[in-house]
Amino acid sequence: MKNISVIGSGTMGNGIAHVFAQNGFKVNLIDISSDALDKALKTIEKNLERMVAKEKIDGATKASTLKNITTHTVLKEGVCKADLVIEAATENAEIKLKIFKDLDSHTPAECILASNTSSIPITQIGAATNRPSQVVGMHFMNPVPVMKLVEVIRGYATSNEVTEKIMTFSKQLHKIPVEVNDYPGFISNRILMPMINEAIISLHEGVAGVEEIDTVMKLGMAHPMGPLQLADFIGLDVCHSIMKVLYEGFGNPKYAPCPLLVNMVTAGYFGVKSGEGFYNWQHGTKDLVVSEQFK
């Protein structure tokens, strides 16, 4: 597989494109917005410059990585010669299913279709195509150029051959793939999101404040950042969406999104991406400043 197409140029999409391009693959980065694509290329270049400054790569690698990426705003043009497509669009089932129906029509018959979804069932996505055996999950972690894990999710119909190819392929990216089966939240978010939700419940019930909750988990559990800070980085809207998938998938009240999380998302407090969540991020992400409403 030499020709890679990545759908979506946001945080995950540009990170995935970066990693493939840096490892010598030709990448078509696709988005409906040319402005979003321009922003993605600037982000990739900035991240490459940071790697050069840290002497992790040289200037030639930076140049070749950028040269390996071509942008497209028309899906058909970007995927017509693809060996592997990785969808990294917004975490919305309706949008993803529409994309995969279109991919089924516009990609070569042998092309493998992968989703970077963090919670939507691969079986459901595969059923939207005429090639469910060639549909698989490739759940990268953020930031993609740094994090080693790739959660490889096999849907009910995903073939052994496709799963093995993606496992091997992930290793070629210098990642560590872990195979999991297709159940709500897979492994990473089935464990992580209820923990984050429980931290929000603890705040909502007045057990402790934002800084106190995060400090306990950082110092007591050796987490690199607290669950509320992490939620802000992930995006509170994304956390909310994943909790809804878990709740609907298992039908268990323990997975119900905390009312505080629901209210924050409804009010537009998404965390870093909106400038405010549990912390105020309007002046950057270096200093932790608790939002006024939680002081």
Image (cartoon, rainbow, N blue to C red):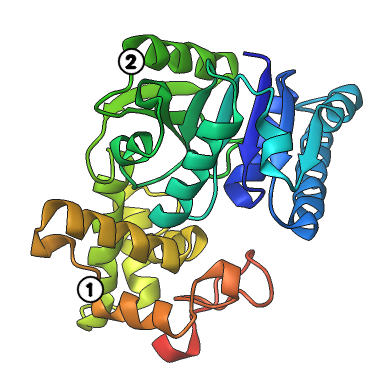
- Up-down relation of residue 161 to residue 198 (above or below): above
Tell me the residue at 57%/68% (across/down): 272
Give the mark nearest the N terminus, 1 or 2: 2
Residue 120 x %, y %: 34, 47
- Mark 1 Cα shell of 10 Å, populated few (<14), some (14-19), many (≥20): some
Callout 1 secondary element: helix
194 horizontally vs 176: left or right: left
Label pair 1/2, CB-CB below 8 angstroms = no
Residue 92 appears anywhere in the view: no
Q: Which quarter shows the C terminus? A: bottom left
Query: Image quarter for residue 174?
Result: top right
139 horizontally vs 179: left or right: right
210 vs 127, nearest the viewer: 127
Q: Which residue is mark 2?
A: 159
Q: Which residue is mark 1?
A: 201
31 vs 232, nearest the viewer: 31
Query: Image quarter for residue 79?
Result: top right
141 vs 75, nearest the viewer: 75
Residue 105 appears anywhere in the view: yes
- Mark 2 Cα shell of 10 Å, populated few (<14), some (14-19), many (≥20): some
Residue 248 x %, y %: 19, 58
Residue 10 x %, y %: 63, 52
Callout 2 secondary element: loop
Q: What amino acid is labelled 1 in the image?
A: Ile
Q: What amino acid is labelled 2 in the image?
A: Ser
